[in-house]
Amino acid sequence: MRIKPGLAETVMTSEGDFTTVFINGAGVDLIVNGSELRMFNGVECKSYSVDDVAIAPHDEFEIRASGCGKGVPGDVYKLQITIPYTLTMGDATATYTEKGYIIGVFE
């Protein structure tokens, strides 16, 4: 896994606003090419991510979203997140996608 979650800094408000932090674990600069977030009830969040900015190894970057659907504080949510990114090593450039789930509680 080249992109690692910083789950201690993850928040989903009862209004459906989401914020989380990821860490570049690739060992080289990477460029995040957007992000897609979808709640398990099918609601697609409007994502605001770091687009087309080089992120140095071990640096953190934030992904935010809104419109994820309202919830009651303390209720559990499950979110699927997809992050496409590009790595360049020497003359070779490749695009990858990390996909995973975040389960937490509405705050």
Image (cartoon, rainbow, N blue to C red):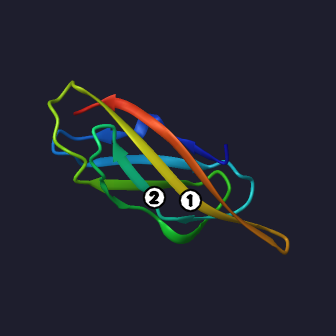
Quarter the C terminus occupies? top left
Where on the picture, by quarter, is residue 48?
A: bottom left
Distance between mark 2 and mark 1 Cα atoms: 7 Å
Q: Image point 37% across, 39% down: which residue?
A: 79
Residue reaching furthest to the right? 90
Residue reaching furthest to the front? 42
Residue 40 position, x and y percent, is 33, 37
Does the CB distance between marks 2 and 1 fall below 8 Å? Answer: yes
Q: Image point 46% across, 37% down: which residue?
A: 101
Relative depth, front residue between 40 and 30: 40
Where on the picture, by quarter, is residue 4?
A: top right
Considering the numbered disc 1 on the image, is that residue within a helix, a strand or a loop? strand
Residue beneath label 1, please? 84
Q: Image point 42% across, 62% down: which residue?
A: 49
In the rendered image of this protein, does residue 24 appear above or below residue 48?
A: above
On residue 54, the disc is none
Residue 89 position, x and y percent, is 81, 66
Residue beneath label 2, please? 35
Q: Left or right: 48 with respect to 54?
A: left
Classify mark 1: residues with Cα within 10 Å, few (<14), some (14-19) or many (20+).
some
> Tag 2: residue type?
Ser
Residue 47 position, x and y percent, is 35, 59
> Tag 1: residue type?
Pro
Considering the numbered disc 2 on the image, is that residue within a helix, a strand or a loop? loop
